[in-house]
Amino acid sequence: MALVKLNNRGVRSATAFGSISALGEMRFIKKVTASSSATVSFVDGTSDVVLDDTYKEYLFTFKNIHPGTDNQAFQVNFRDGGSSYDATKTTTFFEAVHSEDDDSELGYVAANDVAQGTGVHTLTRGTGNDNDECVDGELWLFNPSSTTYVKHFLAEISDSNNNGAISQQKSAGYCNVTAAIDAVQFTFSSGNIDAGTFKLYGIKDS
């Protein structure tokens, strides 16, 4: 069990009970506010973004991400040194759903998987665009600069979908490339990202 607290510099740190050493610090890197944006991208070395071997773990958070078009999947993809977001990946996806009429479901969604493909990874299935509907959540990316190992990522999402339901999506995968991952891009399956806030943090080892 761990306790998260603020240190004397206002930086979040984690300490374990029974241990006198810090486990790491969360350091803010970049905030991007979407406004009718086709994509939101975090590119290493561009606009103050750090996405290299400075940190072994990176955390992306997204708040009140509102699609311009109804019933769209929120997506992510990764760049491995070229100009395109097409890193080869294998992924998995499941969700729990509970609707306003008290219907519910829990299941693995094979249709949202990628098997050694270059396409986007799906984070939600059908986000609504009513004025009060949005996506919130986080995505972790581990050791993206490794040129030895695959680059794992995992995401947890809370999504108000177009059917008047709340969905919790959990997904994970790895980029099966030897090159470093140097950029991450978020999109909807169609239409713009109408509004919302994205933040990037690095997790510094103790």
Image (cartoon, helix red, strand yellow):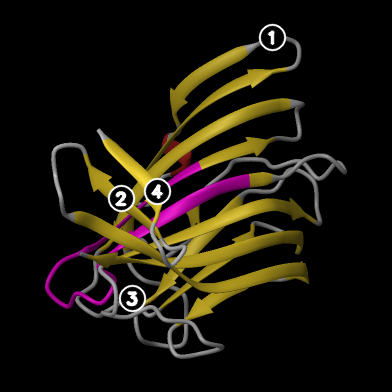
Q: Secondary structure at mark 2?
A: strand
The answer to whether residue 68 is visible is yes
Q: Which residue is mark 1?
A: 102
**Residue stretch in magenta:** 136-156
**The quarter of the displayed image where residue 144 is located:** bottom left
Q: Secondary structure at mark 3?
A: loop
Q: Nearer the viewer, residue 65 or 118?
A: 65
Q: CA distance from mark 4 to mark 1?
A: 38 Å
**x%, y% of residue 9?**
43, 67
From the image, which quarter does the C terminus lie in? bottom left
Q: Amino acid at mark 2?
A: Ala
Q: CA distance from mark 1 to mark 2?
A: 38 Å
Q: CA distance from mark 3 to mark 4?
A: 30 Å
Q: Which residue is mark 4?
A: 5
In the picture, measured across the screen, residue 70 lies left or right of residue 89, that is: right
Q: Which residue is mark 2?
A: 14
Please tell me the numbered disc located at residue 71: none
Q: Amino acid at mark 1?
A: Asp
Please tell me the numbered disc located at residue 181: 3
Q: Nearer the viewer, residue 40 or 179?
A: 40
